[in-house]
Structure formats: structure tokens, C-alpha cells
Amino acid sequence: MRLAMLGSAAGGGYPQWNCRCRVCALAWDNDPRVRRRTQTSMAVSADGESWALVNCAPEILAQIQGLPALQPKALRHSPVASVLLTNADIDHVAGLLSLREAQPFTLLATPAVHEVLRASAAFDVLAPEVVTRTPVELGTSFDLVAGVVAEIFPVPGKIALYLEGGDIRAHGEVQTAIEGEQTIGVELRAGGARVLFIPGCARMTDALRARIEGADAVLFDGTLWRDDEMVQAGVGTKTGRRMGHMSMSGEEGSIAAFAGLDVGRKIYVHINNTNPALIEGSDERIAANRAGWEIAEDGMDIVL
């Protein structure tokens, strides 16, 4: 099984277009310690010919241009056979609007996420006679792409910000660790390998810990280094917990949560522009690496 990281940043990418926080400033100034990143999406294949996308970032066209395996081989052709969505966040679904040139593929998501897409007329550009919208249920296995079997499972999270409503956004009254169809993880199996892709997670649970145990690789939510990171950086008022994301560090962070688990490779994805772990040689990057974590980059290839 081959996994290709098309993008590895959280919403807004890195550097964020309107941000000059300490970490973004390094990228704008072309500091060699950081690498630019697009928003998180991943391609997976068992044979190198037929591919599935897991999430579809706004930069999907540039991401396809950067990976020859996803580029057309005939007059009207695409190796992309399917797209699987882990939630309805803008940075995970907006790229679908760029895949509107009458190219057949299967769009897979939970019924709740399909309902969100149906409620927006913009997504009607994916004509139903061309793009097959297939609901997938939690806890069931299905063929994602030739040779790759997937299973989706709930992880603690929250609904997309734009679905919260004005009063909730203003006052912060929203459940941020609910489990259901709105935020899922994906288990991928091929050739004896087992990989988990979990780009958003609000907290560790016993069920999630049991699923992670023994995986060959886990690509996990690396949005923030610390819960109040955006507040401390002066770029926002929301904590990681409020946004439905675990932090990397701290007693309730993912580094601590994974300690003692038997995992082949631990890779952070969906990394926010404020996260100092983006900086090579930073104390935070060193701490993550010492704990056995890799920091995903655009173009990263994982072969299992």
C-alpha cells in the first residue's frame, strides 16, 4: 500500500495567506527551517494505477499537478477512482468543486456528511449521473479502491464551524467531543498492512486506543502544539479543545496518549500554521521526534 501526502497543513495552509505570526513569518521570509504546506489530503493506492483520495483540499488541482501518479494518462482520464471524506470541514470538501469536469468517480462519506453536501447547491456541479455519491456506515468494511479495504469509525470531534450557527460561534456553546457521523477516522488495509488516518480528534478514548494498538502506521491530528496556542500567538480566541482538536503536548495531549502503544510509525498531519513543531530544530520538533513522531510534509510518500 502506498500513501501519498498531498497536503499536510490544517485549514488555511502554511503559511496562512493573511497571517504573519511567528511561525508564518519564517515561511514568508523563506527561512530554510520551514517548508510550505497545503491543506491536508492524502492519496492511497495498492497497485499504483488506481487511487483514492482521503479528503479533498481546496488546493487539490495543484496537489494533483505535483504527483504524476494522479495525472491523466489519456485524452479524458483520471487515476482517481474515489474520494472519501472524514468530515464536512471546508478544508476537506472544498476541492470537490474543482473536480467538476464530468469525470466519473465515487464520492464516499457518512450519511450526515452527504446531507451537508446536498444542502449546498454548489456541490451540484458534481452531476449525479457522473459522480456516484455512496453513503458508508460506521463500523462496516468496504472497497475504497482496487486492493484497499477501508473501515470508518467515529472519533470525538465536532461539527464544521460553518454549521454551528451565529449564536454558537459568538458564545462558544458547542459540544466539542461528540462521537458520531460528523467526524470519523479511517482504517485502511492492504497487503497485510493496517493504517489509520485520523486528521481530527478531540480526545483519546479507550475504544480509539484499542483500535490504534498494533497499527503499522497512524496519521494523527497534529493541529496544535498546546491548547491555547492560537490565543498566545494573538491570532484567535479559540482553544484547540474548542475547535475539536487534541494538542500534541500536555498531560491530555496526543504524545502522552500514544505513550506505550505499539504503533509502527506515528505521523502528525493537519498541522496548524501557528504550531512551532513546523520549525526544524525547534524545541517542539525535537520533543515530538524524541517521542517517536514524524511531522508530515507535502509530497511525503509512505510505502507499507
Image: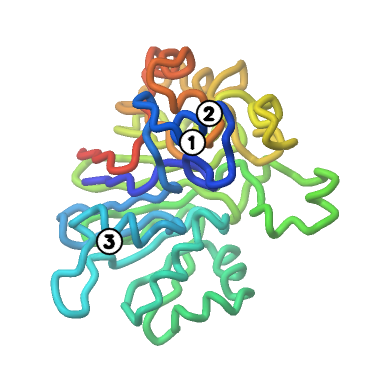
Q: Are marks 3 and 2 in contact (CB under 8 Å)?
A: no
Residue beneath label 2, please? 275
**Marks 3/2: CA–CA distance:** 33 Å
Residue beneath label 1, please? 271
Q: Quadrant of residue 111?
A: bottom right
**Quarter placement of the C terminus:** top left
**Residue at x 80% of width, y 43% of height:** 172
> Does residue 73 sit above or below 294 in this rendering?
below
Q: Quadrant of residue 105?
A: bottom left
Q: Residue flagged by tag 2: what amino acid is it?
A: Asn
Task: Report the colour scheme.
Answer: rainbow
Query: Residue 68 placed where, x, y %?
Result: 18, 56
Q: Earlier in the sequence, mark 3 or mark 1?
A: 3
> Does residue 162 sit above or below 128 in this rendering?
above
**Residue at x 62% of width, y 44% of height:** 157
Q: Is residue 224 left or right of residue 268?
A: right
Nearer to us in this view, 58 or 115: 58
Query: Residue 258 placed where, x, y %?
Result: 47, 22
Nearer to us in this view, 243 or 187: 243
Q: Which mark is residue 145?
A: 3
| Secondary structure of the residue carrying numbered label 2 | loop
Nearer to us in this view, 297 or 54: 297
Q: Residues within 10 Å of mark 3 (few under 14, many from 20)?
A: many
Q: Nearer the viewer, mark 3 or mark 1?
A: 1
**Residue at x 44% of width, y 83% of height:** 127
Outermost residue, bottom direction?
129
Query: Residue 39 placed where, x, y %?
Result: 45, 48
Q: Is residue 154 left or right of residue 81?
A: right
**Residue at x 61% of width, y 32% of height:** 203
